[in-house]
Amino acid sequence: MDTITREDVQQALETRSTIKIIDVLDERMYDKYHLPGAINVPVDNDFDRKIQSVARDKSEPVIVYCLDSDCEASAKAARLMESLGYEEVYDYQAGKADWKEAGLPVNS
């Protein structure tokens, strides 16, 4: 697992057509606001099955994020994904709070 900055996330979303971005918070937190194009796959007991149905190609890059740098959910999700064989997993540790504070667009 590699960490990724807001600038790196922006660049990846602009230049990589196959990248997936995953909000790993619960549905209520996802519905409040999320990054454009993000898919909600909460880190719960069924994460393994859900992530494999959303991100089928384990060689394609995936960015996971949660609320902020104090939130551990994205790091947990990244570790789980690596254990499932995902090859290119990035943890946007600063999360959606950082994205929103920078004035970047969010969906709700």
Image: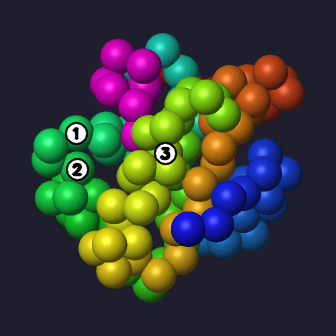
- What is the x, y in percent for residue 73? 44, 39
- What is the x, y in percent for residue 18? 54, 72
Report how far apart the C-alphas of labels 2 and 3 lie in the structure. 12 Å
The residue under label 1 is 44
Q: Do the numbered discs 1 and 3 sit on residues whose CB atoms are within 8 Å?
A: no
Identified at 78% across, 46% down, the residue is 6
Identified by mark 3, the residue type is: Ser
* Residue 97 shows in this picture: yes
The residue under label 2 is 47
The residue under label 3 is 74
Q: Secondary structure at mark 2?
A: helix
Q: Is residue 55 left or right of residue 95?
A: left
Magenta range is 23-30
Identified at 66% across, 71% down, the residue is 16
Q: Secondary structure at mark 1?
A: loop
Q: Nearer the viewer, residue 6 or 104?
A: 6
- What is the x, y in percent for residue 33? 54, 21
Identified by mark 1, the residue type is: Asp
Identified at 59% across, 54% down, the residue is 91
